Amino acid sequence: MNPKAICVVLYPPLCGIVQLTNSAALFFRNWSFTIKVAMQVMNKLRKFIGPSILVLVGSYMLRLSWFKWPDVLIDYGRELYVPWQIIQGKVLYRDINHLYGPFSHYCNALLFQTFGTGLSTLAYFNIFLVILLTTIIYLILKSSFGDLIATTAGIFLLVIFAFSQYTGYSNYNFVCPYSHEITYGIFLFFLGLFIFKKYLMNQRPVYAAFIGLILGLIFLTKVEIFIAGFIALFFGLIFVFRQLKPLHPGKHLLNLILFFILPIIVFFIYFSLHMPLIDALDSLTASYRNIFIDALSHNIYYLHVSGFDYPTQNMSRLLTITIGYLLFFVFIGLISYLFARLSKKVFIYKTAVIIFAVIALFIFFGHFPINWPDMARSFPVFILFLLFYLVINLIIKRDDKTFVAQYLPIIVLILFSLLLLLKMILNVRLYHYGFALAMPATLVMVTLLLFYLPSWVSKWGNKKVFLSFTVIFMFLALLFYFNMTKHIYEVKNYPIAEGRDRFLTFSNPGIIVNDALGQIINLMSANDTLIVMPDGVMLNYLSRKRNPSRYFEFTPNFVEATGEDNIINEISLNPPSFVVLSKKNTEEHGAKYFGMNYGLNIYSWIINNYDKVSSLGNERLNGEEFGISIYKKKKSYHTDYRVKKEEQN
């Protein structure tokens, strides 16, 4: 008999209770199913949380810095002028003096040829590269450390390095860098590291070929990037060949070598069609020989960059900051140890410990404030320690393929980051050249603070407590650098140029530069030529006036290395119609002002052969105020400088 009929016959109220129970059971079954489905959806959506955060952070930094990236006169004009001249028919090294590899300028020339000449062409392409670089770094770190660390590293890349500015000079960002060789080189390394990680999982010859090709392209960028990248990836490849033993290793090695030399041979053939073979070879190797030129390697500027201008003082600061980090780690390690020893029920004691720790930190940092601009000075010490620890572990667990696949790419990254820091070893910083040279090291430090140190502490202390303090420290560092960038970008609102070349800069020197640009266009005919000294080839590019000489930068170290007579000889062969002198303090290069503290013969040659037709700002081109003077070639100019020198001799 039906249970429902029974309950109706025997006891009608019981029927209602049964119905209610059945409904409740059905409800809870449905609710449980709903929760299960919701949890599955949440788990699927969780993998999008990190990328979504990075998209939001990147979008905000783009909006904050939109077309405020380039410097109005220094360095970045070269990155626009050279590819523009290449598509006009000039050949790098033969017609345009250049100290680095050719890849980036010819890549940018191809972009100009394809999408049109304009600052925005390079800016949009570099934004695309930043997106790719962030994605690659995120995927590499996520596979080894999880989503939290990968997302944090991406945030540091976007906020501190990709779109930042910390000084009065721009160019130290990944959108409009002072040198595309360094940003393209770093991007290529991370692309190579990503392929190397694939190679570990599947030893196919095609991956070896791609790694070789990428190393060949890096060779054509900048010396320090190639040396660091080659040594780091070479270490990883040696381990692969010795331990993983891919099938047909000779084929892998052949692919690696052939594709490494392929881009070098292509450029050699191209240059050999436009210059003698020895000059073509010299063009590809000159940047590697230049690191041994005394006039450059012993220049005060490079000594300052490395910290060897005051080695004892800088070493002392490095050790002081390292000790500060160690005291901080010991302190929060002690708090973590106490937390682990207290009973879980004694909540009030744990709260007291946290309050005490926070108060103690405030007191400590009140007396010994954190010098955030110097926070990276001790990075080499900790990265060297971490590298040593991981290499030992790799040797011990060399037969564990899972461990090797997970951590060998990280060891390669750590080695690369340490080698990049050698150029600024006693003066490591996140600003200036640090936007590129210290970026990989900062990513490594993120893994140290969020993964390795908490993992070591967990053996005897509370991992979450230690982690919370390191997260607070990293947040404060991020906030400091973000506020610096935000403050500078808020005052860069003066527009320079128009159309695809338009960007924003400071009103000083922006107003004078705009006025000078207008006068150059009005004074010069279509066939007139222009040289800007000591720096300011941006004016050539924005006015679309070519420089008839191979030389367009006249900093003290360049003048010293090249020689004033050689420079004047070169310029006098095809003298420009106009010369523009701009005020630039080059004291960091060892001499303060062009025409006063260095380049006196070049300045005298200009005064003797050119008439001043306009002055804007500080006419003397020294002191605090910015200024530009425009000179026009005298009608009486007809004598070659070399003839004059022979007559004098």
Image (cartoon, helix red, strand yellow):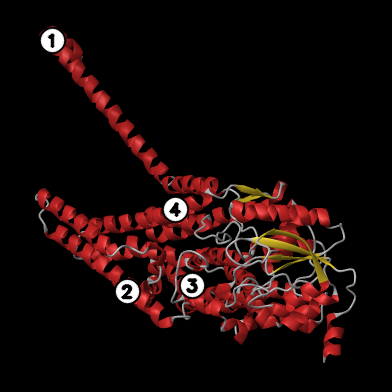
- What residue does disc 2 label? 320
Answer above or below: position of 402 versus 510. Answer: below
**Residue 114 sits in quarter:** bottom right
Which residue is depicted at the point 36% across and 54% down? Answer: 475
Q: Tell which of 11 and 527 is nearer to you.
A: 527
- The answer to whether residue 584 is left or right of residue 400 is right
Q: Tell which of 544 and 279 is nearer to you.
A: 544
Q: Tell which of 237 and 182 is nearer to you.
A: 182
- What residue does disc 1 label? 13
| Residue 456 horizontal/vertical position (percent) | 26, 67
- What residue does disc 4 label? 482
| Kind of residue indicated by mark 4 | Phe
Mark drawn on residue 47:
none
- What residue does disc 3 label? 416
**Residue 596 sits in quarter:** bottom right
Residues marked 4 and 1 touching at CB (< 8 Å): no
| Kind of residue indicated by mark 1 | Pro
Which comes sooner in the sequence, label 1 or label 3? 1
| Residue 322 horizontal/vertical position (percent) | 33, 72
Q: CA distance from mark 4 to mark 1?
A: 70 Å
Q: CA distance from mark 4 to mark 3?
A: 26 Å
